[in-house]
């Protein structure tokens, strides 16, 4: 779904958007809480690419990461757009909703990490336990 959205946005932005979706097949079938990833991608477009006169690129990547405290799924949305400027990161409703849902689903075992992308842009990273059960949160649309 994210690839289709980015393709539509590339057409709408008339060449000002390049994108890459880098999700290995082994990770691609892992369920995510509905709406989280698309919210991060929409934010990258709205706050990063659209305000930048030259546009930029969006990269969506996913990988697993084994740690001493268990395996994690790390999903990253990186843009090379306008960056933070003078605004403080993470103050919007969409990001607040993501944080709240992560806390409800996983407590302190999941995070939303935000940081500037050098030399320009922004990085949003979802860090989830690799083995997570989202069945109680799945809607009929998210299981198609």
Image (spheres, rainbow, N blue to C red):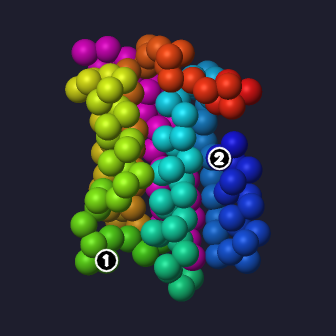
Magenta stretch: includes residue 64: yes
For disc 2, the marked residue is 2
Q: Residues within 10 Å of mark 1 (few under 14, many from 20)?
A: few
N-term mark: 1 or 2: 2
Q: Residues within 10 Å of mark 2 (few under 14, many from 20)?
A: some
For disc 1, the marked residue is 85
Q: Are marks 1 and 2 in contact (CB under 8 Å)?
A: no
- Secondary structure at badge 2 equals helix
- Identify the residue at horizontal 56%, vertical 82% (top origin): 54
Q: Main secondary structure of the magenta part?
A: strand
Depth order, front residue of 142/22: 142
Q: Quadrant of the C terminus?
A: top right
- Identify the residue at horizontal 69%, vertical 54% (top origin): 5
Q: Position of residue 12 (x, y in %)?
A: 73, 72
- Secondary structure at badge 1 equals loop
Magenta stretch: includes residue 121: no
Any part of residue 65 in sight: no
- To which quarter of the image does residue 19 belong? bottom right
Say which mark, if any, is on residue 122.
none
- Identify the residue at horizontal 37%, vertical 50% (top origin): 95
- For marks 1 and 2, give the CA distance: 26 Å
Magenta region: which residues? 55-80
Task: Answer with left or right where residue 105 lies relative to residue 15.
Answer: left
Is 130 drawn above or below residue 77 in the view shown?
Answer: above
Is 98 drawn above or below residue 78 in the view shown?
Answer: above
């Amino acid at each position: 779904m994210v690839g289709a959205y980015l393709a539509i946005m590339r057409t709408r932005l008339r060449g000002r958007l390049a994108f890459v979706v880098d999700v290995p097949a082994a990770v691609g079938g892992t369920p995510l809480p509905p709406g989280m990833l698309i919210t991060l991608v929409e934010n990258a477009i709205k706050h990063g690419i659209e305000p930048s006169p030259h546009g930029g690129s969006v990269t969506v990547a996913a990988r697993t990461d084994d740690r001493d405290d268990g395996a994690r799924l790390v999903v990253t949305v990186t843009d090379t757009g306008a960056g933070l400027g003078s605004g403080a990161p993470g103050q919007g409703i969409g990001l607040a909703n993501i944080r709240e849902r992560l806390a409800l689903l996983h407590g302190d075992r999941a995070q939303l990490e935000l940081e500037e992308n050098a030399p320009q842009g922004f990085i949003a990273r979802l860090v989830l336990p690799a083995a997570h059960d989202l069945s109680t949160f799945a809607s009929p649309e998210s299981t198609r």
